[in-house]
Amino acid sequence: MFKNSYFNYDNRNIFVIDDFLPDYDYSQERYVEFLNFPNTYFENGGLGYDITPNDNNFNSQIFEYIEKYANEALKLVNLGELETIKTKVFIKGDITSPFMKAIHQDDTADLNNGYTLSYHCFGDNNAGGTIFYYDKQGLKPMLRIPHKANRLVIFPASIHHTGYAYPGFKNNSVRIIFTLFTYIKMLPIHLRTLNYTINKIPLNLKPKFE
C-alpha cells in the first residue's frame, strides 16, 4: 500500500498516491459490470449527488473501503483528517462523458479546507485522466495526471480541472472513478511544515507518472 507517492505538486496541495488500497483485486468481470452503471456526474459540471447506500447499482463497500484508508493517506501527506464527506460520486469517464467537457471546481470549493479524493478504480492505464488548470478558462494547464488503477488523487476542490480521454482504447477509454467531495480538518500550517521537515517529504516534486 502507498507504494509510490508524489507530494505537493507546485505547492498546490495536489497529491497522488499509487497502490492506495491493500489487496486491490482487479477483475475484468467487475469492470464490465461497472460499465453498465449510470454516471452520477452532472452534465453542466456542477454538483454531483450522493450515492444512496441501499442502491444495488453501486458497491457502497468500495466507498467504505476508500473512507477507511483515506485518513492514512491524508496523514501521509500531512493535510490532516476527514471532517465531513459532503458528496460521493460515481464517475464513468470516457470520450463522450460530460466530465471530459466542463472545466469546473468541485462541490466543496466554497471553503479552503474543501478537498476532493478521487479514486481510480478500473480502466486502462493512461487511457485518460485529469487536467488541472491555473485559471477557470483553461488557458494555462498546470498538471496532467493520467488514470491508473488503484491510484488516489487528492487535491483542493477549488482548483479548476477537467477530464480527458484518448480515442482508440477499448471501451472508449472508460475509467471507473469513485470520488469523495470532502472537508478536511487541516493540520495547523506550522505543524505541517514541521512534519514535512521531519519526514523529509519533498515540497515540490516534479512527478514522473507511469
Image (tube, grey):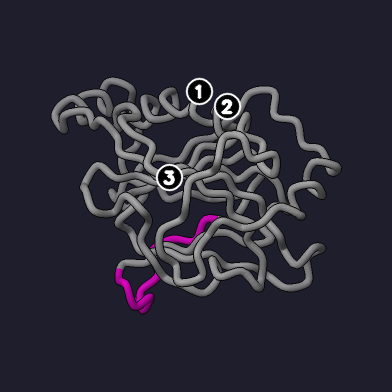
Name the residue beneath numbered marker 2.
Answer: 65
Q: Is residue 149 above or below residue 140?
A: above
> Is 143 included in the stretch rendered in magenta?
yes
Q: Nearer the viewer, mark 3 or mark 2?
A: 3
Q: Nearer the viewer, residue 7 or 165?
A: 165
Name the residue beneath numbered marker 1.
Answer: 68
Residue 66, given in percent of the width and then of the height, sits at 54, 31
Residue 76, given in percent of the width and then of the height, sits at 40, 26
The residue depicted at 37 percent of the width and 42 percent of the height is 86
Q: Quadrant of residue 205?
A: top left
Going from N to C along the chain, the mark reached first, 1 or 3, is 1
Q: Amino acid at mark 2?
A: Tyr
The residue depicted at 54 percent of the width and 43 percent of the height is 51
Q: Amino acid at mark 3?
A: Thr
Which quadrant would the N terminus be assigned to in this image?
A: top right
The residue depicted at 23 percent of the width and 32 percent of the height is 186
Q: Is residue 125 above or below residue 80?
A: below
Residues under numbered marks 1 and 2 in contact, where contact means CB atoms less than 8 Å apart: yes
Name the residue beneath numbered marker 3.
Answer: 87
How many numbered badges does the structure rendering display? 3
Q: Nearer the viewer, residue 136 or 142?
A: 136
